[in-house]
Image (cartoon, grey):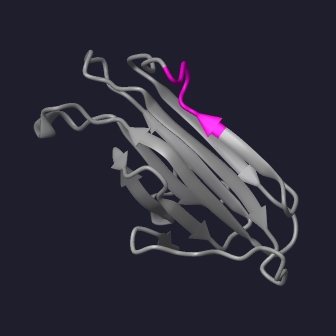
Amino acid sequence: MTDGQVLTLSSPGYPAFYPDNLDYTWVISATGNGSFLLEFHELILMTKRPDLYVDKLTIGVGEDIFDDEVVLEEMNFFPTGTTIMIYVRHIWLRLQSDYKKYRQRGFLVDIERLDVTSKSKSFSWTTEDIFF
């Protein structure tokens, strides 16, 4: 991605339910110094039973999705409008679902690449914002 570019990602089938037995990964790379701004419009992977929270979206940094040391967050629910700022060149998102029929709509997120030296974008952060 280049500075200022916005990429919209969603779970397969969104806004309908995503499939069972899913293991899908997106790797996003950028040039230059900067950060990624992730704005979640929806993230609902959980069921009504807390003991069945098996489906998850994992966010990590770097190019190796199998390196547990670069996992930033594993989640199954975020309030609408939650924002995450990550200062790296490579990020990845991995959606995993199990074989059970307990699933939801999934997620919709806008990812924007920002030049950290640019003053052209201003932000108003809330307490729900997360920085890595």
Residue lying at 47% horizontally and 60% vertically, measured from the top left: 71
| Residue 4 shown in magenta | no
The foreground one among 64 and 114 is 114
- Say above or below: 37 vs 105: below
Pick the residue in front: 100 or 109.
Answer: 109
Q: How far from the left and from the top, in percent, is residue 80?
A: 44, 49
Image quadrant holding the N terminus, namely bottom right
- Above or below for 1 versus 96: below
Q: Residue at x 37, y 28 (%)?
A: 97
Main SS of residues in magenta:
loop
- Name the residue at 38% across, 17% down: 20
**Drawn side of residue 27 relative to residue 55, left or right:** right
Q: Which residues are magenta?
A: 9-15
Residue 11 is situated, as x and y percent measured from the top left of the image, at: 53, 30
Q: How many marks?
A: 0
Is 76 on the left-hand or right-hand side of 36? Answer: left
Q: Is residue 64 at all visible to an observer of this figure?
A: no
Is residue 30 left or right of 64 when viewed as pictured?
Answer: right
In percent of width and height, residue 118 lies at 84, 80
Quarter of the figure with residue 128: bottom left
State the image coordinates of residue 73 (x, y, percent, origin top left): 42, 59
At a point 83% along the width and 54% down the height, the residue shown is 5
Whether residue 93 can be seen here: yes
Does 100 sit left or right of 65 as displayed? left
